[in-house]
Amino acid sequence: MPLVGARGGLGRGLSAIMPEDPADQVVAELARRVDELERELARHEQRTEAMTAEQTYLAAASFVRCNPDAYALVVEHAKEAVAAGERFSVKREFEDMRGKVPAVGSLAYRYCNAITPAIARMVVVDVPEVDPYLRRGKSKVDKYFDGTVEPPEPWRGGADG
């Protein structure tokens, strides 16, 4: 019997003569770990991509409460953009701040791009003049800011309070 099998290479040939093949155990363990990591990745993608409007709003509100200095910096940059007549993007702000300004609170709320739509609407509440300069599209959280639905909780109430 050849040691090199047709399907599994050397390990498969050896498994025919060895009752407990260590190579097959290693392969089985690696396959189990790959499956586990793929399931974890799928759960993570569901959490970030399938956040409900309420979850997104609450995550943004939590970010603002846990990171008032970071939020104040976003508001300040929005005011500067208005004064300069330039477009403003909260997502771009988060990208710029991510490595420079440490965020506090749950890992889920640390400069997460999923909360930028809600943060952008909070900035418009605090700095209404930024509205024409702010880059934002339609969002599932719009209903909490246009008066359609009462928000689950107040996010803060403005830059000063």
Image (cartoon, rainbow, N blue to C red):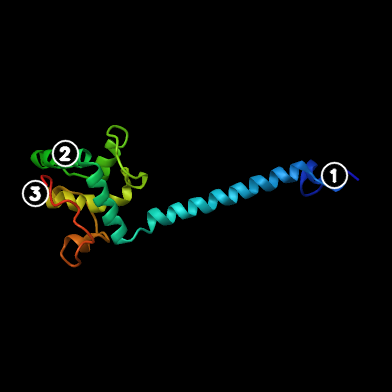
Quarter of the figure with the N terminus: top right
Calculate the distance from the C-alpha at mark 1 to the C-alpha at mark 3: 76 Å
Q: Which mark is residue 18?
A: 1
Answer whether residue 133 is visible to the viewer in this image: yes
Q: Position of residue 40 (x, y in %)?
A: 50, 51
Q: Which residue is mark 2?
A: 77
Of the pair 127 and 102, the residue shown nearer to us: 102
How crowded pointer 2 is (Cα within 10 Å; few <14, some 14-19, many 20+) is rated as: some
Where disc 3 sits, the SS reads helix
Calculate the distance from the C-alpha at mark 2 to the C-alpha at mark 3: 13 Å
Calculate the distance from the C-alpha at mark 2 to the C-alpha at mark 1: 68 Å
Of the pair 152 and 74, the residue shown nearer to us: 152
| Residue located at (29% from left, 61% from top) | 53
In primary-sequence order, the first of circles 1 and 3 is: 1
| Residue located at (27% from left, 36% from top) | 97
| Residue located at (18% from left, 38% from top) | 73
Type of residue at label 1?
Met
Q: Position of residue 160 (x, y in %)?
A: 10, 45
Q: Which mark is residue 129?
A: 3
